[in-house]
Image (cartoon, coloured by chain):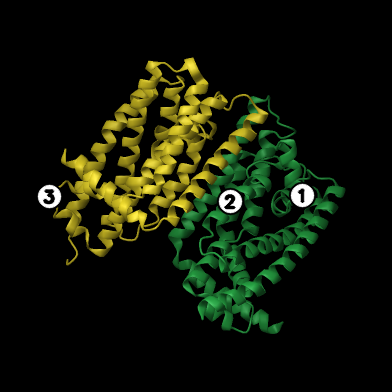
Chain colours: A green, B yellow
Amino acid sequence: MRHLVALYRAQFRTTIAEQLQYRGALAIWMLGLILEPVIYLSVWSTVARSQGGDVDGFTAASFAAYFIVVMLVDHATFTWVMWEFEFWVREGNLSPLLLRPVHPIHRQIAVNLTFKLLTLVIVVPVAAVLVLVFRPNFSGIEPWGVATFVVALVLAIALRYAIEWTLALLAFWTTRVTAINKLYIVAFLFLSGQAVPIALLPGPARTLAEWLPFYRVLGFPVELLLGRLTPRDAAVGIAAQVVWIAVIWLAMERVWSRGVRQYSAVGA
Amino acid sequence: MTPLRLLGVHLRLGILNELQYRTNLVAQLASSLVGLLTALFGLGIVFSKTDSLAGWRPDELLAIVGVYFLVGGLAQTVVQPSLSRFMEEIRLGTLDFTLTKPVDAQFLASIKKIEVWKLIDVLIGVGLIAVALVRLGEAVGVREAAMFGLLLAAGMAIVYSFLVILATFAFWFVKLDNIFNIFQSMYEAGRWPISIYPGWLRASLTFVVPIGFAVTVPASGLVGRLAPSNVALAVVLAVAMPLAARGFWRFGIRHYAGASA
């Protein structure tokens, strides 16, 4: 354990130094960060106004609250491991990582957490500006919601990591994973609550969203914080998160051990 | 005749080049399809809750999505890859070979690299516009079609000039390879009518990055909901921006000292 702490600290330092070199890439990333919630927020606020101020219980101000918190939770949970892993396998960068005495996932997690901490400097002011511009309605926030939100957010980070790391491992079998990744991104966009609160999806799509893990990563913690869920929904949601993490984690371990064998066969 | 023949040659080279990498076709097909699905799902969900978005009815918004794919596809087939190559050539010094050719350098730099498979997006765009037209039926007459053609041409001239101006900055700032990603990122916002956005964003999508003129305005022409002032502004910009881009380009060329300097 002490060994791992030292590893994470070393990785934090190198990642900060690395990221500061790519300021242009950071600026572009920031633009996407702002634009995405603003686009969906504008679309749905317009819909709310055209329906006399309210769509299924969402007003323009509650859409603003929803999409600003979506931006924050998305930032906390997102990973780029699917793109990076494909590159590692294709270019052979994975080989030296496999020789290290720790699982490569630790390096990934450390880099991811550092990037998140570093970019908080950007994300927090962006959120503050969006709050000033769009005047969200945060009146539903309650102490119990905030407390369970913290738990749900930590679980959401773990769940998204497990999902996307498992998806990334497909690169062991095919070197062209871009198409799969893009399909995943669309599914995530509509079924997680990123483009629209799942309460507004048509019936069957909504049921699908509730049964699949994507909503548990994004929409569920967001609605929990904003006070849109009952204590019962919260309990069910957190249980679903735990079950999904367990299931996907088990799958991931099996896929990883098979994939590594496959990889060494190609490299030899 | 020569510029057209030159374009033809580059198109053929682009196709031959891409035929080496046929899996790219599959990748691009998947990517275009995903883009189409995203757009259509988005429209479907929005219109399950309302009849019109900022005054736009479903078939009219379909026309916007069509123009979005058409203009974006054209830019990404020819203009963006070529200008990216041009910026790289400034960095490497190989631009000298382009400048010494007996053709206009701006023209050559704008058609140099062709990403053939991106034409799929152009086809999707044309298809969507056709579907929208059929569904709109009699509402679209000759006048609307002519207006659409005019505004589409104007929009493309404006976007092209904008991209040339961006690329020309590479004469001074050598590492600018991310600049088109910024454009791409903002272009996403063009899938919806820009009147839904708050004032500051609408203004930047009109005058800073002219996506409104590229997508919303031509589509407005098609569905006949166009303010005369917008037509005038589009035409003025379609004349002024290419001239400005040309002037800036020549200014940049004068600044360029070549590889050995």
- Amino acid beneath label 1: Trp
Q: Are marks 3 and 2 on the same chain?
A: no
- Amino acid beneath label 2: Leu
Q: Which residue is mark 2?
A: A183
In the rendered image, which quarter contains the N terminus of chain A?
bottom right
- Amino acid beneath label 3: Pro
Q: Which residue is mark 3?
A: B102
The answer to whether any part of residue A193 appears in the image is no
A18 vs B188, nearest the viewer: B188
The answer to whether any part of residue B238 appears in the image is yes
**Could you tell me which chain the residue with mark 2 belongs to?**
A
**Could you tell me which chain the residue with mark 3 belongs to?**
B
Residue A84 drawn at (x, y percent): 53, 66
Helix, strand or loop status at disc 3: loop
At a point 26% along the width and 42% down the height, the residue shown is B245
Helix, strand or loop status at disc 2: helix
Residue A259 drawn at (x, y percent): 62, 72
